[in-house]
Amino acid sequence: MIVYTNLWETLKKRGISQYKLINTYGISTGQLDRLRKNESVSTNTLDKLCNVLDCGLYDIAEYIKDTP
């Protein structure tokens, strides 16, 4: 399972609000909603976030292995 907990921490560290992501950088509210719910997002969205936040993928997402 991929979770996006790191994204919210990175946004806070960089001083970038969700409002700014939407209005300045063109990230859709739908994409942010999917990220909040740890749902599937495109690699294009992840790439855009990495560019906007000047960070690596590990600063946005984390893989957590499902336990049986």
Image: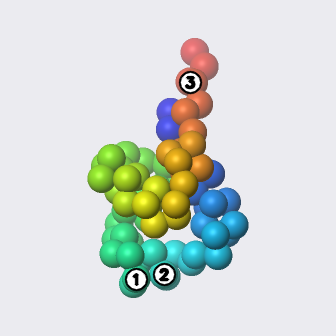
Q: Residues within 10 Å of mark 3 (few under 14, many from 20)?
A: few
Q: Which secondary structure, mark 1?
A: loop
CB atoms of marks 1 and 2 within 8 Å: yes
Image quadrant in which you'd find residue 7: bottom right
Q: On the rendered structure, is 51 left or right of 44?
A: right
Quadrant where the C terminus sits is top right
Mark toward the start of the polypeptide (2 vs 3):
2
Instruction: Name the residue located 59 percent from the left edge and 31 percent from the top edge.
Output: 64
Q: CA distance from mark 3 to mark 1?
A: 36 Å
Mark 3 and 1 residues: CB-CB less than 8 Å, in contact? Answer: no
Q: Above or below — where is 2 with respect to 66?
A: below
Circle 2 sits on which residue? 20
The CA distance from mark 2 to mark 3 is 33 Å
Residue at mark 3: 66
Q: Amino acid at mark 3?
A: Asp
Q: Report the residue at 67% width, 60% height from top.
A: 9
Nearer to us: label 3 or label 1: 1
Q: Earlier in the sequence, mark 3 or mark 1?
A: 1
> In the image, residue 56 lies at what x, y percent?
53, 48
Residue 29 shows in the view: yes
Rendered residue at 57%/77% (across/down): 17
Quadrant of the rendered image containing residue 62: top right
Inter-mark Cα distance, 1 to 2 = 5 Å
Q: Which residue is mark 1?
A: 24
User: Element type at marker 2?
Assistant: helix
Counting other residues with Cα less than 10 Å from the Cα at mark 1, is it few (<14), some (14-19), or many (20 or more)? few
